[in-house]
Amino acid sequence: GQPVHVLCSDTRADKRSLFRRLLEESRLRDAISQRAEFLGRPVGELTVAVKPTFMLGYHRKDPSPVTDPELIDDLASYLGEIGSGEVVLIEGPNIYDRFFHNRAVHDVARYWGLNSNAYRIVDSADEQVPHSYRRGMAQYTIARSWRDADFRISFPKIRSHPIEIALLSVGNVEWVGGRCDEYLFLERQADRATAIMMLLDGFPPHFAILDGFDLFGRDGVRPRWPERMQ
């Protein structure tokens, strides 16, 4: 029910200034202040969990499935400027680590240059704790940092997806629960949508940012509106 803010540019040089404008115009500061008031605690005591997407990245020549590391740093810096508490960057492994070395969350984060002192990186697979979801099925655990965060931000890169057509802020939360390959079976079909809905029902994000600033379409063709974020 909240307004959606979309900012566009014709040049890559505007990326960081455009992102700053987006954070201000979308009133992220106010959203965090309202959350602090609701919890009855100072903003400086709030833990902010940010869920980007970078685990499908495989080479620096193709950043299309990766939330821009510069924008992640800028978001963490902005959160520090407005006085929020600890910022936790949370991601989870996918099936790549079944076939390749150096695919742990911290390995991939280091490869993409995600090493700022403005946030702490956690691997959601290392933090899974049991949780009894009040409805549905297909989820039985949750990452502790996502569960305990006072304010949650979903911050994916707009990219193609074999099921969703385009991965946006809703599908991006799937990695804070069980691994995606836990829902692949030879003898039955699991409902991925149900698994995601359980996460959204129990631990929804309070804010969403979409990085669509530098996109590549099929066969490496740049789309008509590459410099966009919302």
Image (spheres, rainbow, N blue to C red):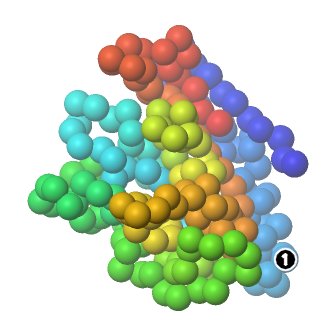
**Residue 115: quadrant of the picture:** bottom left
Whether residue 94 is visible here, answered yes or no, is yes
Identify the residue shown where x is 57% and y is 51%.
Answer: 171
Labels in figure, total: 1
Q: Is residue 41 above or below residue 2?
A: below
Instruction: Residue 189 in the image: state x and y as whole percent.
Output: 49, 58
Extreme residue in the front direction: 187
Q: Is residue 105 left or right of residue 137?
A: left
Q: Is residue 15 above or below residue 169?
A: above
Identify the residue shown where x is 62% and y is 22%.
Answer: 8
Identify the residue shown where x is 52% and y is 46%.
Answer: 156
Identify the residue shown where x is 61% and y is 48%.
Answer: 169
Please name the amino acid that badge 1 sits on. Phe
Q: Is residue 47 left or right of residue 72?
A: right
Whether residue 144 is visible here, answered yes or no, is no
Q: Secondary structure at mark 1?
A: helix
**Quadrant in which the C terminus is drawn:** top right
Nearest the eye: 154 or 203: 203
Nearest the eye: 141 or 149: 141
Instruction: Residue 71 in the image: state x and y as whole percent.
Output: 47, 44
Instruction: Residue 98 in the image: state x and y as whole percent.
Output: 20, 61
**Residue beneath disc 1:** 38
Nearest the eye: 102 or 26: 102
Q: Is residue 14 above or below residue 85?
A: above
